Image (cartoon, rainbow, N blue to C red):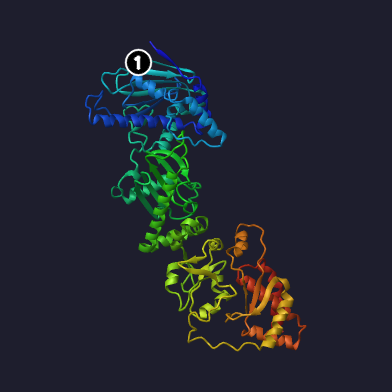
Amino acid sequence: MAEQFSFKAEIQQLLDILIHSLYTDREIFLRELISNASDALTRVQFESLTNSNLVDAGAELYIEITPDEEAGTLTISDSGIGMTREEMVENLGVIAHSGAKAFVQKLKEQQAAGGQDVIGQFGVGFYSVFMVADKVRVVSRSAHPEAQAFAWESNGSDTYTIEPSDRETRGTDIIITVKEDAKDFLKTWKLSDIVRRHSDYIAYPIYVGEPKEGEEQEAVNKQVAIWRQESKEVTDEQYDEFYKMLTFDWEKPVHHIHMRADVPLQFYALLYVPAGSEANPLMGRREPGLKLYARKVLIQDNTTELLPDYLNFVAGVVDSEDLPLSVSRETVQATRVMANLKKTITNKVLNELKRLQKNKPEVYHQIFEAFGRHIKQGVVVSPGEREDIEPLLMFPSTKTASADEWITLQQYVERMAENQTDIYYVIGDDYASATRSPHLDAFRQRGIEVLYFVDPVDPVLIMGLSEFSGHKLRAADEADIDLSNVGAVSADEEAPRDALPEDQFTGVQERFKAVLGERVTDVKESKNLVGSPARLVTSDHNPTRNMFRINRLMDRDYELPVKALELNPRHPLIYNLSGKLAADPQNPIIDAVIEQVFETALLQDGIHPDPASMAARLYQLMQAATE
């Protein structure tokens, strides 16, 4: 005869929270029941090592999921350790006997605070079944020979029953009478899909549906988690195949990182660096984040808490034995353990990138070409890791042969010119325009290398990169740079033309000021220009002085910076202007040339707001030149 047990008064309220508030996805119930079944199989496997007197000692260890659309039931069976009557009371009534009222109150408090960060120690996974069940019947027979089978039954109300039952073999059957609005969970294809997504790496075979006549039934799940194997046991082909399955990316990954650690907590990880930043158009957009498993059971599909944002191009899985999960096991709690886990994985990725840079530069070059912008952003968004990121940065320079040839900051430092203490860079919209920058005149003359910052994110990078290895980073357009004692002028350099006499240069200078007005802060003589007539310089050393470039990149409103204009008193153009001023101060060509000199300087700095507007003036100057 069935014995009836009463749940405590608050159990109905608790089940309502479990069903309607705790879980975000109904299909989680199947993952939870499979996990319980896996635990039961592990327990019987362990006990069989020391106790041969078990029911069905040589039986296969398996999980079976059988839908019956006609009856409206779903059965999850296992050949595990099973339960006695007393264990049913203890295990299936655990909520009712473990301070349910306090648990309900805790959940209320968490929900009121906008979160559910309750430690997952209340064993509520089984009760997730009531999201889809009108009634649940559990039939179980313990593996111990003296125990008989019992059945536990509940419809989620205030009572449950336990009665003797029949089961010839050891293990447990969970028979779910499915709700009318949950009939999709009686479809074999849907059940198989849930198993593959959430429980693919459970160590025991999971069979779904009835086997076809004359065919041996195959397990739906893969069972073997590649990331838990020794790396020497896994072939390159297996690594690549798993990557394709994980990401749906047809291209082989550039590199993989297979790691295992025991501190700060035990975990396994298999991480991949994709071949490129562009996703295959047929695979859809890959969300950033790693797949997070707890004991080979998928907890989160795209976990962004395990790597910093600047490494979100890394794909892969992380699997831990003891993650601090929320009570629903759908989320991970933000704890010191998680912070340490993130730090460990991040350090491993950064160290692996450094190793590739040193030992396999061609591989690292490919990675940096695809994801260099991500790495550069890390200098700004993760200042605590700046020293680890800086060695990974690479740039073209005045001493590299092309835009695709890069050097590191350390390589730059190692080949500094005599008496050089600062690292110099020039910002440009692209490599070609940067190479023609007038700011490079004096640096080239003295053999001083200058880095080209031509990536759109480089103005952002500057905000976090003020120095490297004790050397300040300075823009080549800074007005107060003094190169007189740095490097040496090449013996092949032609002697510079004599400067325009001071009184004549002053006339040109004043005319420039009159024409340009407030568009420049000053017009002054340049000490550094060699082959260019003019350049725009700044005395503002604040890293945010390039915010206009960032705003322009993000299509925001911006104002052009107002800079000082330096003129080269040795350039033929300045000589000719001086001559025209002396001969005919009212000649309109003089002002047209001044406007063009200024706007050309804007263009060379990549900050001209409307280059096409120069066309009419250029035609005017060409016409004057041909008269």
The residue that appears at 21% across and 27% down in the rendered structure is 52
Which residue is drawn at the image coordinates 47% and 25% (left, top)? 100
Q: Which residue is mark 1?
A: 165
Amino acid type of disc 1?
Answer: Ser
**What residue sits 48% from the left and 82% below the top?**
488
Picture residue at 47% right of the left edge, 40% below the top: 333
Q: Is residue 562 above or below residue 505?
A: above
Residue 379 at x, y percent in the picture: 50, 59
Q: Quadrant of the C terminus?
A: bottom right
* Image location (x, y in percent) of residue 165: 35, 15
Q: Name the foreground residue: 316 vs 476.
A: 476
- In the rendered image, is residue 132 in sight? no
Regarding residue 133, the answer to whether it shows in the image is yes
Residue lying furthest top: 1
Could you say which is closer to the camera, residue 625 or residue 47? 47
**In the displayed structure image, the side of residue 250 where residue 496 appears, left or right:** right
